[in-house]
Image (cartoon, grey):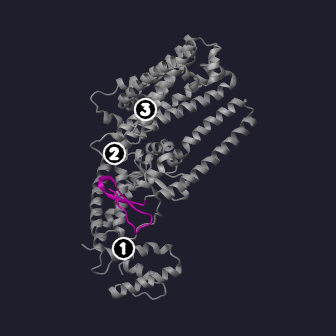
Amino acid sequence: MVSHHDDFSPELGTVLALDNVPVELPVARVGSRVLAAFLDYLVLLVVLIVWTVAVFFLARGLGLRPGWGVAAWLIGAFAIDYGYFAVQEIVFDGRTVGKRVFGLRVVARDGAAAGNGALLVRNLVRTIDVLVGVLLMALDPLSRRLGDRLAGTLVVHQRPTAAEVVLVRLPAGWGAAETRLVESFLRRAPELEAEARVTLGRRLERWVDERAPGFLPGIPGPDPMPRLWRGFREGG
Amino acid sequence: MDYARFVALRRPLWDAFEADAAAARRARDLSYAQIEDLALRYRQVLHDHAWARARFPGTGAAQRLLRLAVLGGTVLQREEQESFSLVRFFFHRFPAAVSVHLPWIGVALGLFLVTGLLGIAVAVYEPGVAVAMLGSERVADLHQGRLWTDSLTTTMPPSVSSSFIATNNMSVALTAWAGGALVGLGSLWVAMFNGFMLGAVFGITARYSMAAELATFVVAHGPLELTLIIVCAGAGLGIGVAILRADELPRSVTVPRAAQEALVVLLGCLPWFVLLGIVEGFLSPDPDIPFAWKALLGVALEICFLSPLALGLITRAPGVPRSQELRR
């Protein structure tokens, strides 16, 4: 089951986790994934160049016969080529350098951490995905390339892990929409600039006072945050 | 029940579940009682999540309960963590995965043999193929009674040819495996192309009465090398069949499961290519090693690869369903 919500950015894809719990994941779309891959291939190229130079100087420094240097280079280049993505994703919890820069992460299809086997599988078919992956990602609602389909993985935007704010006290008759509004503001308030926080806080304060007079405690001062915080989170 | 009351009543349960589930996630082993207790509270969290999602969608409580549901699912469906053992892998896990793929390995072998015979026939009855496949210089060498493999020892050091051969063969095996993602067509192509090439090369050398020399070159590394490529192609075909086959479960479940099994087959094959690279780079081109010794080495390598497989298949516990066996 897949759905889209145009009022969110980035787009959310709904997948079913264990026990059919619908989980909305901020699925990474083809643009950010291509950019991350492009950066990764640039880094891979740099790593290969560094490996080449390192082998050259090591072989000279250790006085190796010419053949052994070339042999070491070949094996190393093969390992870097096939291992660059898979090893990073296994070691760094589904992230490569490119994915880290663009805030992406590989997860299992149910939103849990992807297993090592799945991360290996999705990268072993990369040679085919270089040819068809972009098209498949563009056509798929969950932006999966061939490797993702084979491994049962998704690439998602890494959200900042700010803890949810759960209100413990509400005016009588308030429903989900009002609750969501206040919780959303209180959760985001610490990230706002002071001026914006005070301005928006005052608007919210007035909005609450109009609908539920006397609900918020009477705390004097220019900053509305203590009043809002005590009113909704500490029981007035 | 209003939102504030719901949160006040149920929050202690959520807090306790989050702490215990996070601790269980970090723990290496959990007792049965711990799992049972966690599963019971996970059900309560699921119940609360369903209620909050229906009554208070998008609120902090609904978001927190969703996070707890995913956390609980992750902890409870975590597979048993076993330390990796090479012996267990090569004697149990790898044979079990190969046994699943035996029909498709058989298909790959059959196609390899058929295209091999076709290659011999084409090379014998259509001499122009010799030049097209080998190039005029190599055919000229054959005219003069020399195999192109002789130059392996003169044009590049064995260390280089050895590492080149090993990485090249691994690439072929990876292509045969990954080709399964193209509904098995890539795997079929690798099996058939290699069969045709081998047959054609033998056919060409036979025309110049050099087949025995070629056999001397390939006998040490060839049998196992081809076995590995055919096994990897069979694993790739397994993926292709999983993509095509309609099952009771959706393909989003069956295809990743098949790919994981095929991955075990690939991982069991890849290390052998390193050994084969050394044999092909250092021993196979050596004219001082007689045919009999090379043949003995070829047979020994094949036995080394196949015997753990055979042992693993024979000693598999009777009566244990294959699906359960694979989870070990």
Are the residues under marks 3 and 1 on the same chain? no
Looking at the image, residue B266 sits to the left or right of residue B59; the answer is right
Residue A229 part of the magenta segment: no
Residue that carries the numbered disc 2 in the rendered image: B251
Local secondary structure at mark 1: helix
Q: Is residue A109 above or below residue A192?
A: above
Local secondary structure at mark 2: helix
Quadrant assignment for the C terminus of chain B: top left
Q: Residue at x 43, y 44 (%)?
A: A118
Determine crowd level at label 2: few under 14, some 14-19, many 20+ residues with C-alpha closer than 10 A: some
Residue that carries the numbered disc 3 in the rendered image: B188
Marks 2 & 1, CB-CB < 8 Å contact: no
Residue that carries the numbered disc 1 in the rendered image: A180
Q: Residue at x 67, y 33 (%)?
A: A70
Looking at the image, residue B135 sits to the left or right of residue B122; the answer is right
Q: Which residues are magenta?
A: A1-26
Q: Nearer the viewer, mark 2 or mark 3?
A: 3
Residue A5 part of the magenta segment: yes
Q: Is residue A211 above or below residue B160?
A: below
| Residue A210 visible in the picture | yes
Looking at marks 2 and 3 on the same chain, the residue that comes earlier in the sequence is marked by: 3
Check disc 3 and give the amino acid type.
Leu
Check disc 2 and give the amino acid type.
Arg
Check disc 1 and give the amino acid type.
Arg
Q: Residue at x 42, y 36 (%)?
A: B185
Taking the view exactly as shown, the residue that stands out farthest to the left is B1
Quadrant assignment for the N terminus of chain B: bottom left
Q: Position of residue B171 (x, y in %)?
A: 53, 34
